């Protein structure tokens, strides 16, 4: 029922109540009115009549009474129904009834109480409706009878009717007016409510501009005001929200990084423009699809594990179940001095120990076997001897890896040299604890990285949901036409209020530029480093030269001081010679010996100057082959070489070497002279130049080379191989010592090779000798390339 | 034949004494000795030699400075000068007598014959 109707009904009800109340009131008052009316006029009439008739009543003159009654009745025919008179005994004396008297009338008589002046009784029975007015007939104060006058009800009623009608009419009119007014009022009340309602409906439909015109100051008016305020607030809130939403949307759509939202069932929920552009899909081609669609999953578990391997500094291997090497890091290549392709696929015991069988006790126990049994990292200490006879201890450790890696990768194996000199096996074991820890760490890292990178299926998503987020994972997106793009992927979970997974939002950053940048940066850094090292080398060479000039000054001082007396001696000997006469051959001989001694001393001084005096070291990029040729020419011009076959095997197009030409010539000449002098009866010298190591050097030499030259550093190698008498074993260590000579006092000062080695050292190069007594000698020189081709 | 006049400027007394002895013994030379480098110029002007043997490393003055002085003096600038030096590596030179940097020199210790050889070679350098 509508409010208006309710109000109306309420008002009508009230009016009805009021009306009923009024009617009752009116009826009551009308009743009262009746009584008054009767009291006033009819009672008075009855009284007067009773007074008139009392004598008759006392004398019992019935006929007189009766005629009086009839007379009175006739006079007031319209209002009197009957008149009765009773004597004091209650006996009806007279009445006006012509016919039968109703029974009720007979019963009317009753005595008056003292003081009661009259009695009015209303009688309604079958067909009789009267008001009976009874008055006592008095003689003085004595009651002698009663007089009843029956006033016709209809007479009173007529009176009443008129009054009632008028009041009803009044009431009706008032009611109608009241209803009309209440209609107006209810409308007045309802209308603002309706307005409010209409406005609310508008608001509920989304139109927040609806405003209520508030006229009244009552509660409804206040409601209107509040409503207006509320809609205004709502409107500004909504406007803020929509602009915030627009703001967020424009951020997302303008983001350079590719955004993606993923449902818990691993389908794509939404993507931003950058994702579409990056991958070459339209938005509708991606939404709803499995998000594995856009990830390139070709990194096998093995490759992922391999990436971790590269981070390990010690030589580390991934070995399969049948002991074959599956992956290695660069440190392994350096340690073994072998090419990668010669290592992968071989058995680990073959490559590492040159053995046909797995390492076994009593000496070297295989840590892999033990690891298999114990299923945890195991460390063993192995030993081997280097070419100088020193014992080298290494800790080797192995740990089995997670099954998810498959059969091809089963063990992680690390070698680390024990760093204490003269360490014992027990000392080595101390370090094993650390090694085992590290191994566990690496194994765990591998497992975790694999877990992370293989997340992109539903189980992976759930795992990520547990951890809450993923940061900067390097994975590959796959474009529509199959191209793979490296990206850095970060994601967070979206949860509802009950912490249930609602979705995952991820951002992928295109790494290609960054990687290119890093690559070129690395290249620049490497170049810079090479440059720096070159610079360092040159600097060191110059410092050496500086030192040499200081020593050289000393040497020149010594030379001067010694040669002057030598000069005097020689001149003196010459003079004595001049004074000899024939036949003094013995004196002549003695003088000859003196001259020889002077000569020898002179040569030593020469050698000393040689050894220590350097003018400025002139380093220039030089071609080794031309220096060799030059040296040969010089040698040939000075010494007898007719019975020596000289074979040249010089490689064409060798890289240039930063060197002092004169000094190198000196070295070559020196070596050639030694060779020539070792073959007094003729022989052969082979001179070779090339730029590749044979890889077959003895361990001591190999180590020397490794210490001197960085991996991959360019080198030029010169070899002088002769078929001379060779160098006996016991002398091999001494040949580079200063003043060591086997040539006897005549021809050797013993400074040649030591000076040569000095020169090579100043060039940051190497010189070494290999020889077999009776067979021949090979001198090898190694020089660094100048790096500029 | 007239004797050639040789001036030797060297602070090693014994050496110069013996050289004078040996050279004059041949009968071909007249030798004047000067042991002080600073007096070399004066000696040359006085003696007017045909050739000067000049030691490089002397205590009071370097030979090259003396040579410069000689060059600057009109009277002496045309006299051939041969340097005496102890600090040269024999391996670098063919013999005790040679030329370094355009200047003739003799490497000590030197025998008399080599000395005479060198003197004769450079005497007519003019």
Image (cartoon, rainbow, N blue to C red):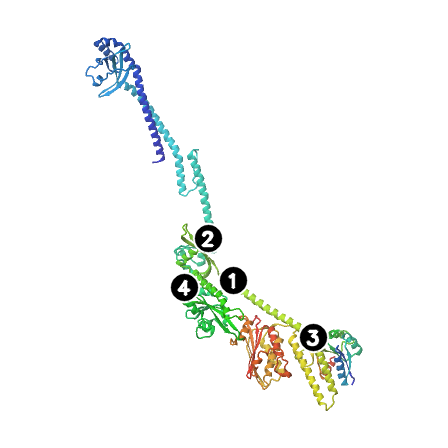
The one nearer the camera, B25 or A226, is B25
Q: Earlier in the sequence, mark 4 or mark 2?
A: 2
Looking at the rendered image, the disc whose residue lies closer to the viewer, 4 or 2, is 4
Q: Is residue A644 left or right of residue A359?
A: right
Residue linked to disc 3: A557
Q: Earlier in the sequence, mark 2 or mark 3?
A: 2
Tell me where residue A323 appears, x and y as whole percent. 43, 71
Q: Are marks 1 and 3 in contact (CB under 8 Å)?
A: no
Q: Earlier in the sequence, mark 3 or mark 4?
A: 4
Q: Earlier in the sequence, mark 2 or mark 1?
A: 2
Secondary structure found at label 2: helix
Residue linked to disc 2: A252
- Check chain identity for marks 2 and 1: say if they share one: yes
Residue linked to disc 1: A518
Tell me where residue A389 appears, x and y as whole percent. 53, 75
The Cα atoms of the two marked residues, 4 and 2, are separated by 38 Å
Q: Earlier in the sequence, mark 1 or mark 4?
A: 4
| Chain ID, mark 3 | A
- Check chain identity for marks 1 and 4: say if they share one: yes
Q: Look at the image and tell me whether residue A693 can be seen.
A: no
Secondary structure found at label 4: helix
Q: Are marks 2 and 3 in contact (CB under 8 Å)?
A: no
Find residue A404 and name its label: 4
């Amino acid at each position: 029922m509508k409010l208006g109707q309710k109000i109306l009904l309420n008002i009508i009800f009230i009016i009805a109540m009021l009306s009923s109340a009024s009617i009752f009131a009116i009826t009551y008052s009308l009743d009262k009115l009746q009584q008054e009316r009767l009291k006033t006029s009819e009672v008075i009439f009855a009284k007067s009549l009773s007074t008139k008739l009392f004598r008759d009543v006392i004398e019992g003159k019935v006929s007189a009474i009766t005629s009086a009654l009839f007379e009175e009745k006739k006079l007031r025919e319209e209002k009197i129904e009957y008149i009765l008179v009773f004597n004091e005994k209650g006996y009806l004396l007279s009445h006006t009834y012509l016919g039968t008297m109703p029974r009720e009338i007979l019963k009317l008589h009753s005595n008056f109480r003292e003081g009661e002046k009259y009695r009015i009784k209303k009688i309604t029975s079958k067909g009789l409706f009267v008001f009976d007015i009874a008055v006592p007939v008095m003689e003085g104060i004595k009651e002698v009878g009663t007089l009843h006058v029956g006033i016709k009800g209809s007479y009173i009623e007529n009176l009443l009717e008129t009054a009632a009608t008028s009041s009803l009419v009044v009431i009706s009119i008032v009611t109608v007016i009241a209803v009309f007014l209440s209609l107006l009022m209810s409308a007045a009340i309802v209308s603002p409510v309706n307005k409010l309602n209409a406005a609310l409906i508008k608001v509920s439909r989304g139109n927040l501009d609806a405003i209520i015109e508030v006229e009244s100051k009552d509660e409804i008016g206040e409601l209107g005001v509040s409503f207006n305020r509320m809609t205004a607030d709502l409107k500004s809130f909504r406007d803020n929200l929509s602009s915030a939403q627009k703001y967020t949307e424009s951020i997302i759509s303008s983001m350079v990084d590719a955004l993606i939202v993923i449902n818990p069932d691993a389908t794509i929920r939404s993507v931003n423009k950058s994702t579409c552009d990056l991958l070459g899909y339209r938005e509708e081609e991606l939404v709803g699809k499995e998000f594995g669609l856009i990830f390139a999953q070709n990194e096998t578990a093995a490759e992922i594990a391999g990436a971790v391997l590269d981070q390990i500094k010690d030589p580390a291997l991934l070995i399969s179940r049948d002991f074959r090497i599956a992956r290695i890091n660069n440190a392994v290549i350096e340690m073994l001095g072998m090419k990668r392709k010669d290592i992968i696929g071989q058995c680990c015991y073959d490559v590492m120990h040159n053995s046909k069988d797995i390492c076994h006790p009593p000496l070297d126990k295989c840590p892999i076997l033990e690891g298999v049994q114990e299923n945890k990292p195991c460390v063993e200490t192995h030993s081997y001897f280097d070419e100088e006879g020193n014992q080298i201890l290494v800790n080797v450790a192995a740990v089995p890896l997670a099954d998810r890696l498959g059969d091809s990768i089963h063990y992680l194996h690390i070698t680390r040299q024990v760093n204490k000199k003269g360490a014992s096996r027990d000392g080595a074991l101390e370090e094993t604890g650390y090694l085992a820890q590290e191994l566990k760490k690496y194994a765990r890292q591998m497992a975790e990285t694999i877990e992370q990178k293989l997340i992109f299926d539903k189980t992976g998503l759930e795992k990520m949901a547990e951890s809450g987020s993923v940061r900067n994972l390097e994975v590959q997106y796959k474009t529509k036409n199959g191209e793979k793009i490296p990206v850095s992927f970060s994601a967070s979970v979206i949860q509802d209020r009950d912490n249930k997974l609602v979705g995952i939002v991820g951002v992928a950053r295109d790494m290609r530029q960054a990687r290119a940048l890093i690559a070129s940066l690395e290249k620049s850094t490497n170049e810079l480093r090479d440059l720096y090292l070159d610079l360092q080398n040159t600097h060191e060479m110059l410092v050496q030269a500086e030192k040499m000039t200081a020593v050289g000054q000393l040497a020149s001082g010594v030379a001067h001081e010694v040669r002057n007396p030598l000069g005097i001696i020689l001149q003196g000997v010459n003079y004595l010679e001049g004074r000899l006469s024939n036949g003094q051959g013995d004196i002549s001989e003695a003088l000859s010996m003196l001259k020889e001694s002077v000569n020898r001393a002179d040569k030593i001084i020469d050698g000393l100057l040689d050894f220590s005096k350097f003018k400025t070291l002139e380093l220039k990029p030089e071609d080794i082959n031309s220096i060799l040729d030059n040296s040969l020419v010089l040698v040939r011009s000075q010494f007898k070489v007719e019975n020596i076959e000289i074979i040249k095997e010089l490689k064409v197009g060798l890289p240039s070497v930063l060197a002092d030409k004169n000094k190198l010539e000196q070295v070559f000449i020196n070596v050639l002279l030694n060779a020539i002098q070792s073959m007094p009866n003729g022989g052969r010298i082979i001179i070779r130049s090339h730029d590749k190591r044979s890889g077959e050097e003895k361990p001591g030499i190999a180590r020397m080379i490794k210490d001197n030259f960085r991996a991959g550093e360019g080198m030029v190698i010169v070899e002088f191989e002769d078929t001379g008498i060779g160098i006996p074993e016991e002398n091999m260590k001494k040949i580079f010592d200063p003043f060591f000579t086997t040539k006897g006092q005549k021809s050797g000062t013993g400074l040649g090779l030591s000076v040569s080695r000095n020169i090579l050292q100043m060039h940051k190069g190497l010189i070494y000798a290999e020889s077999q007594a009776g067979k021949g000698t090979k001198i090898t020189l190694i020089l660094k390339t100048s790096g500029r081709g | 034949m007239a004797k050639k006049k040789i001036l030797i400027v060297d602070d090693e007394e014994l050496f110069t004494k013996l050289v004078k002895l040996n050279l004059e013994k041949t009968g071909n030379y007249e030798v004047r000795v000067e042991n002080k480098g600073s007096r070399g110029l004066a000696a040359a002007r006085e003696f007017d030699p045909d050739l000067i043997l000049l030691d490089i490393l002397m205590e009071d003055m370097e030979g090259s400075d003396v040579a410069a002085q000689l060059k600057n003096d009109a009277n002496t600038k045309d006299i051939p000068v041969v340097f005496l030096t102890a600090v040269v590596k024999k391996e670098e030179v063919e013999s005790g007598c040679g030329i370094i940097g355009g200047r003739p020199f003799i490497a000590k210790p030197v025998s008399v014959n080599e000395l005479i050889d060198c003197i004769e070679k450079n005497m007519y350098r003019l």
